[in-house]
Image (cartoon, grey):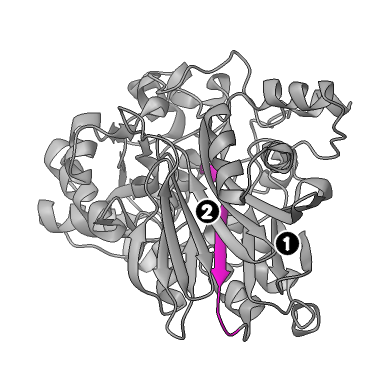
């Protein structure tokens, strides 16, 4: 277990999405690895530990993957050998399995049906049980990621086609998965029946198709005819052809992750046919109506809170201004998500704009408050820059429960709202006032009251989860 120094601020108190996935198939085969490279750039925010691309020319598959950001993992020299017609890519932040080299995706294996590569966004709640079954059947496992479990189950599945093998295997997977699969002559993608994580497909401008975790990657590639991969659906990309197949019935109650709107998705993406930026502005508007503050200026914690701060400012009638400047390159030094890498102090990540803060009563807007280790130093930073009052407003309810479906929020004993009341948190962070948006108001901003997973706020999980579902739950098998 990581030891937290109470005297050192955790500069990165945000929840972590574990990855972004991408798949591309073209009829011409020109620059498919480069297309995957550009697509992964647009998904960098979903995972900054590692990146990988696998490409098939119809006969042979090649993969290049390594720890680091997309811009450092790939060079013209290592992209050049990745020639072919079909590609998948991945950016990673670990939620199941530690962040070591053996867990970097895509996973590539040779099967009796040809080469298979898999990349996955999500988390299986029954991964340990499935892994035990594979070990009992004599499979050798070398990684500790649930994506390896998915890959080997597909490799061992019966069926004439990869579509049939995926369809036969999907009922055994319990939890969140939006995944891309590279076979010799095609790219396939599948989404769990609850629809936890986003996945969309679009048509490339020069022919062919792409599938990605977020629509921002598809628009970056110039895609048109963009639509979501439905919960329980398999899509197949073969050059200029797109085939869709409802492999498993969608869950009676869908469970799309509401936190995609609050924090994870890029603001220029669309999720559940809603623009993320617009939803975040509405979150700010609802927050202003529910929790107004007597203040002089509205300031966001950049970057994900900016749209909400704009919405709060407009609704309450207070000016919006920058008060914190973010060092956008600090993330390059934090490749592994361990506490030792996090504990560097908030001053490395933010500077205060004293000219905009001196003598001002500030409403500080943030998207979420998880462990509570960043909020206090931010409040102190504003006060040191001259703010006379700091009123903190959060665009979601208190996070009181762990996520078991692909988000590393930590365990309940690490979540400050699970340990302290709102007033106690206010005193802990040193704010003049603190308020969270209610669940009803959050869902009003999203635009519907059902069909979403809000378990991190309510503890009501859409799927039964075990007692211990931490990110290292598979490590013991190889210990």
Find residue 306 and report its horizontal and vertical position in percent: 33, 59
| Residue at (60, 48) in percent of width and height | 120
- Which residue is nearer to you in this view: 253 or 388? 253
304 falls in the magenta region: no
Q: Is residue 360 visible?
A: no
Find out whether the residues at labels 2 and 1 contact each other: C-beta distance under 8 Å: no
Query: Magenta segment, which residues?
Result: 14-28
Mark whose residue sits in front, 2 or 1: 2
Quadrant of the frame with the N terminus: top right
Return the disc, 2 or 1, that comes first in the chain's sequence.
1
Q: Does residue 9 appear left or right of residue 257 in this picture?
A: right
Could you say whether the residue bearing mark 2 is in a helix, strand or loop? strand
Up-down relation of residue 12 to residue 450 (above or below): below
Find the distance from the CA under tag 2 to the CA under tag 1: 25 Å
On residue 68, the disc is 1
- Which residue is nearer to you in this view: 25 or 345? 25
| Residue at (56, 44) in percent of width and height | 164
On residue 369, the disc is none
Q: Is residue 86 visible?
A: yes
- Which residue is nearer to you in this view: 450 or 313? 450
Q: Quadrant of residue 227?
A: bottom left
- Which residue is nearer to you in this view: 341 or 216? 216
| Residue at (63, 63) in percent of width and height | 89
Magenta highlight: main SS: strand
Q: Residue furthest top?
A: 467
Quadrant of the frame with the C terminus: top right
Q: Quadrant of residue 13?
A: top right
Residue ID for mark 2: 189
Find residue 331 and report its horizontal and vertical position in percent: 63, 59
Find residue 472 and report its horizontal and vertical position in percent: 72, 30
| Residue at (68, 36) in percent of width and height | 146
């Amino acid at each position: 277990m990581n030891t937290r120094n109470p005297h050192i601020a955790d500069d990165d108190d945000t929840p972590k999405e574990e990855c972004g996935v991408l798949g591309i198939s073209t009829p011409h085969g020109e620059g498919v690895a480069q297309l995957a490279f550009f697509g992964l750039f647009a998904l960098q925010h979903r995972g900054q530990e590692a990146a990988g691309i696998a490409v098939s020319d119809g006969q042979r598959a090649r993969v290049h993957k390594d720890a680091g950001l997309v811009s450092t993992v790939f060079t013209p020299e290592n992209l050049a050998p990745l020639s072919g017609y079909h590609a998948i890519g991945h950016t990673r932040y670990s939620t199941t399995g530690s962040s070591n080299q053996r867990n970097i995706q895509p996973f590539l294996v040779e099967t009796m049906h040809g080469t298979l590569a898999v990349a996955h966004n999500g988390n299986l709640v029954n991964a340990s049980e499935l892994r035990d079954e594979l070990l009992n059947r004599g499979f050798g496992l070398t990684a500790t990621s649930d994506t390896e479990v998915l890959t080997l189950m597909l490799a061992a599945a019966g069926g004439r086609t990869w579509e049939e093998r995926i369809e036969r295997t999907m009922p055994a997977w319990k939890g969140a998965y939006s995944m891309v699969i590279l076979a010799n002559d095609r790219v396939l993608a599948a989404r769990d029946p609850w629809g936890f994580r986003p996945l969309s497909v679009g048509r490339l401008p020069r022919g062919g198709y792409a599938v990605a975790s977020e629509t921002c990657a598809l628009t970056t590639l110039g895609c048109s005819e963009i639509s979501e991969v439905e919960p329980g659906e398999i899509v197949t990309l073969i050059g200029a052809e797109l085939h869709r197949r409802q492999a498993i019935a969608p869950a009676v109650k869908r469970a799309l992750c509401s936190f995609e709107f609050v924090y994870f998705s890029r603001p220029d993406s669309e999720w559940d046919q809603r623009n993320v930026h617009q939803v975040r502005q509405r979150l700010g508007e609802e927050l202003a109506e529910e929790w107004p503050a007597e203040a002089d200026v509205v300031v966001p914690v950049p970057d994900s809170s900016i749209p909400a701060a704009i919405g709060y400012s407009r609704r309450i009638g207070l000016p919006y201004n920058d008060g914190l400047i973010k060092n956008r390159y600090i993330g390059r030094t934090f490749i592994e998500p361990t506490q030792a890498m996090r504990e560097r102090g908030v001053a490395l990540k933010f500077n205060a704009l004293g000219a905009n803060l001196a003598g001002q009563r500030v409403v500080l807007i943030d998207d979420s408050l998880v462990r509570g280790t960043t909020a206090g130093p931010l409040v102190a930073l504003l006060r040191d820059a001259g703010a006379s009052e700091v009123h903190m407003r959060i665009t979601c309810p208190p996070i009181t429960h762990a996520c078991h479906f692909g988000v590393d929020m930590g365990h309940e004993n690490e979540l400050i709202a699970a340990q302290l009341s709102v007033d106690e948190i206010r005193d802990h962070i040193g704010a003049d006032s603190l308020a969270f948006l209610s669940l009803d108001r959050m869902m009003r901003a999203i635009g519907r009251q059902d069909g979403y997973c809000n378990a991190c706020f309510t503890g009501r999980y859409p799927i039964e989860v075990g007692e211990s579902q931490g990110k290292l739950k598979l490590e013991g098998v190889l210990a």
